[in-house]
Amino acid sequence: MFVGKSLVLGPIGAQLDEASAGAIGRAMKAASFKADFAKSLEILAPAGLSMDRIVLIGAGDGLPGVTDFLKLGGAAMGALKDVEEISVIAELDAADIGAGASSLIAMGMKLRAYDFDRYKTEKGQPKEQKAASNVAILCADADGAEAAWQEDCVVADGALLARDLVNEPANVLGPKEFAAKAKALEALGAKVDILKQDELEELGMNALLGVAQGSVRKPRVAVMKWKGGDKDAAPVVFIGKGVVFDSGGISIKPAAGMEDMKGDMGGAAAVTGLMHALCARKAKLNAIGIIGLVENMPDGNSMRPGDIITSMSGQTIEVVNTDAEGRLVLADLLHYAKEKFEPRFMINLATLTGAVVVALGAHNAGIFSNSDGLCEQLSASGELTGETVWRLPLGKDYDKMIDSKFADMKNSGGRWAGSITAAQFLKRFVGDVDWVHIDVAGTAMDSPKTEISQGWASGFGVRLLDRLVKDHYEN
Ligand code: BES
Ligand code: MN
Ligand code: ZN
């Protein structure tokens, strides 16, 4: 149950306190419990009650906001790890907290309960998988909470799918295996096309193919289509960078930390998780997810620095650094999406630059856009989900930094403003479609522990974009 700074219990809490001869009130006093936000107090085997424990979660002062309910749920699950039966008393400061907030608490619990331990053994034997906790939420408007949960549950599933994909090591999850995960969305009613090497060659996706050519594992592009809107309505399109492993290629990365580059498909994972959510909750719009799945490896057949490739758009690119590979993959996908689907908007997600980690850390994704309106909508969705974004500038002077002596452009503008010049590169492929590039290098992977995540893969982007769609693009 939840307690605000007043330390006043709600109706059910007050009943339990009475039935236990004041055990809850006494415990709060004895422990000097201040109900600070997300702090917990555990009362074991309360006398006169059949339950094994009561856990109080502090809600701090003031009315909690939307993301606070997620965190309160997360804190509750953190305090109740490994408990099989959990009843959540959804009241605060003597009142019921409402259906929407109850569902958010459940969502926070589900997100916090996720742990990626599938490769941990007990003395060489696969670890016994613990059954999920059985959670009941006690709130006044049960029907309303149930309805909200129908949607929130599958959005959380999408975020957890994204986490799974990001956590999975690259030997297990190559382009082919990732494509199979995308294909599995057909069970939810999506139509999924998997484009292989020969089709990508036919389309002329030479920038994407250039990245893939050093790997023994062939590339895939997955196109996931959800039709929940009017037959002829223009779709919204989400595009993800899916570099299953980024060694840097011939411009090889230093050894230290290279293992993190199994997460260089965080953009593609978010797009897949988002499509899962939209299909599973039968979102009322047409949406398309496109992910470019490649591996960037050094090899006798790799691209070299200095190579010039002709992208699908016809524009030529001098590859001055084979480690600036994500933008090559996205360049062809953005052009393909624009030509083939005439989208309402295109949003791409990518773990694109180390520079955005330097600028914003793990607490904001960088956004770059040609549309003020989309940026405002995204910022609002960020505040509502806790997946926050911060806009960085674009402009002619930055664009000039990627002009090349030998080709139309080069794929790196150097260290300074590295995130912006990467975005300028992408912008050369979007035409006049409304577009946002979200650089999730700091937010999707190698993420800190929070109330709702046990760290590394965060699933960043799924809840953010589901919210954007729900609030602005459904009928
Ligand atoms: N995948 C990396 C960016 C990255 C860095 C993601 C750290 C997550 C954490 C990307 O492909 C890359 O290597 N970018 C280079 C670009 C440079 C060569 C112009 C970078 O950021 O250093
Ligand atoms: Mn790279
Ligand atoms: Zn990369």
Image (spheres, rainbow, N blue to C red):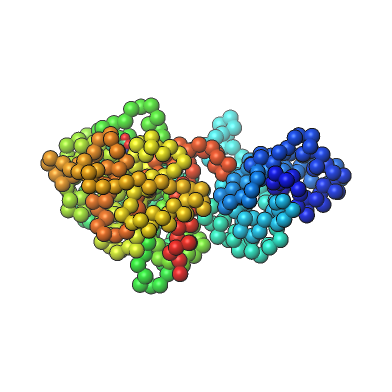
Give the total of numbered labels: 0
**Residue 374, quarter of the rendered image:** bottom left
Q: Residue furthest bottom?
A: 231
Image height of 98 relative to 121, above or below: below
Question: Ligand 1 is located in which of the four quadrants?
Answer: top left
Would residue 462 be found to the left or right of residue 339 on screen? right
Would residue 16 be found to the left or right of residue 163 on screen? right
- Front residue of 363/179: it is 363
**Residue 371, quarter of the rendered image:** bottom left
**Residue 295, quarter of the rendered image:** top left
Is residue 187 among the parts visible in the rendering? no
Identified at 47% across, 64% down, the residue is 283
- Front residue of 47/211: it is 47
- Front residue of 12/230: it is 12
- Front residue of 355/227: it is 355
Identified at 64% across, 42% down, the residue is 37
Image height of 66 relative to 112, above or below: below
Identified at 43% across, 37% down, the residue is 361
Pinpoint residue 372: horizontal percent, then vertical percent: 35, 56
Pinpoint residue 55: horizontal percent, then vertical percent: 72, 43
**Rendered-image quadrant of the C terminus:** bottom left
